[in-house]
């Protein structure tokens, strides 16, 4: 179907929403993004975008052949927590390099590309109701304004308010994992910009360089039971972080000593949505398939969704058919990646003899480990 002039609303101006808006606009649709935040800002934090995500960014002309604003990855060093002993070195995937982005930079690239393509982006516009009529979607904004479009895409994140319209109410599950996130100056660190994954009992720490090696991104994951709210962007206490990881030696201890500001995320999860679409309404990104961050694939999956969604209109006769084809094309892939991330939640946090056995295995297969996930990285949604 030709989507020239088709009126499409996108709810959410995150990575998934902006990429979907751009992909649809590039095919001629008349796209408006509704983002509740008054500005597209992000707390200081990084994102790993592997080859499968980069393929979509390239196809959308958001980045060039060499993604300028990203920092090229040189692989990952696996370490034990006590003294930071190197267990193994994982080379970059064969499918193509990963790039590290400051979230704010990637959002800005997508935002600029979407505006240049002619997407209408409305900030400070929170969608409070969506009605899925037979031939159109109707949105109600918090300002009281009502809008109609021929299709609505909900890219409103893991706490999607639109998802219950298609799936009923679902209580989120607390995964008993807390993510601490900080960025610090890179200055003193090793010259080769490698990511590092340091594993300890019930905890792990990931670090990687950002912005031309001027910053280091730190994500420290901790198993915890004392959390009540599905809240975001909580300000944390750097001394509390250091205390909770005080038995981590080596580079992690040194890096944590530089943390002056830190934020906390409690990792809540909903299952893969049973229904991604119906009639004129579809879910995309975390709204459809929230994932633990332990494969670093949530944003990459959202980018893939965006491309496949727009492409699905090409060989279908109507909006509802295109949205159904999009779900069919994406469901299994998203499910497999989400499962792989869930498995890593266990693998990274092993205790006692299990941890030692896993380390020996990692030492032996580490250099070949990225091959295990080649099916993730080598997938090219744009091919
Ligand atoms: C600790 C951590 C590390 C991660 N690291 C990586 C990584 O390295 N690589 C990777 O690929 N992924 C990573 N992820 C996952 C990634 O951040 C998410 O999967 C991705 O941001 C999802 O994008 P999205 O557009 O679907 O949703 P979001 O980024 O959540 O965007 C949703 C947008 O919708 C807006 N919104 C919500 N409700 C409304 C409403 N009613 N009206 C209007 N606007 C609304 C929100 O304000 C927001 O801007 C990580 C996640 C975590 C927690």
Image (spheres, rainbow, N blue to C red):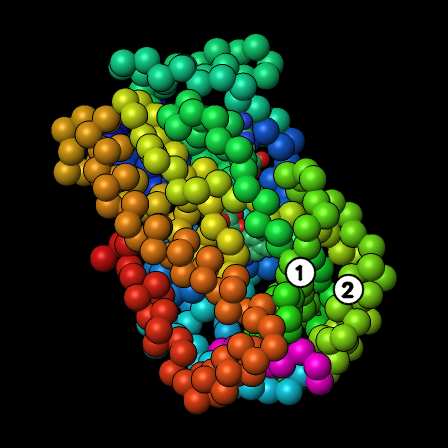
Say whether residue 225 is visible: yes
- Circle 2 is placed at which residue position? 244
Is residue 209 positioned above or below 140 on the image? below
- Locate the C terminus and report the quarter of the image it occupies: bottom left
- Circle 1 is placed at which residue position? 222
Identify the mark nearer the N-term, 1 or 2. Answer: 1
Which residues are the magenta region? 75-83
Which element is circle 2 on? helix
Q: Which of 164 and 100 is in front in this view?
A: 164
* Ligand 1 closer than 8 Å to label 1 CB: no
239 in the magenta segment: no
Is residue 298 positioned above or below 152 on the image? below
Is residue 289 positioned above or below 341 on the image? above
At a point 76% along the width and 56% down the height, the residue shown is 262
Whole-Å distance between the Cαs marked 1 and 2? 8 Å
The residue most toward the right is: 239
């Amino acid at each position: 179907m030709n989507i020239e002039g088709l009126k499409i609303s996108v709810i959410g101006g995150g990575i998934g929403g902006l990429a979907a808006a751009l992909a649809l606009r590039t095919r001629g649709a008349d796209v408006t993004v509704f983002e509740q935040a008054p500005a597209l800002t992000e707390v200081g934090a990084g994102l790993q975008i592997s080859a499968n995500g980069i393929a979509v960014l390239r196809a959308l002309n958001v980045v060039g052949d060499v993604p300028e604003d990203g920092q090229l990855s040189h692989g990952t060093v696996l370490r034990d927590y006590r003294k930071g002993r190197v267990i193994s070195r994982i080379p970059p995937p064969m499918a193509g390099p990963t790039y590290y982005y400051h979230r704010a930079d990637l959002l800005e690239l997508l935002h600029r590309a979407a505006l240049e393509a002619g997407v209408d982006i409305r900030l400070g516009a929170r969608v409070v109701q969506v009605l899925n009529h037979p031939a159109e979607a109707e949105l109600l904004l918090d300002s009281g304004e009502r809008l109609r479009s021929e299709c609505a895409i909900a890219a409103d994140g893991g706490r999607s308010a639109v998802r219950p319209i298609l799936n009923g109410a679902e209580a989120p599950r607390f995964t008993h994992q807390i993510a601490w996130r900080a960025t610090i100056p890179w200055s003193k660190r090793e010259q080769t910009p490698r990511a590092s994954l340091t594993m300890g009992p019930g905890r792990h720490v990931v670090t990687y360089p950002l912005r031309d090696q001027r910053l280091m991104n730190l994500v420290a994951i901790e198993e915890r039971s004392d959390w009540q709210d599905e809240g975001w962007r909580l300000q944390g206490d750097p001394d509390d972080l250091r205390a909770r990881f005080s038995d981590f030696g080596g580079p992690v201890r040194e890096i944590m000593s530089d943390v002056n500001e830190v934020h906390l995320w409690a990792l809540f999860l909903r299952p893969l949505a049973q229904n991604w679409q119906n009639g004129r309404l579809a879910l995309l990104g975390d709204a459809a398939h929230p994932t633990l961050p332990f494969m670093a694939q949530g944003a990459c999956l959202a980018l893939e969704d965006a491309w496949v969604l727009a492409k699905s209109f090409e060989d279908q006769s109507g909006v509802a058919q295109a949205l159904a084809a999009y779900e069919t094309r994406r469901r299994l892939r998203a499910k497999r990646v989400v499962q792989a991330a869930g498995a890593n939640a266990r693998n990274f946090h092993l205790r006692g003899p299990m941890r030692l056995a896993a380390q020996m295995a990692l030492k032996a297969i580490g250099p070949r480990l990225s091959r295990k996930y080649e099916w993730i990285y080598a997938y090219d949604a744009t091919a």
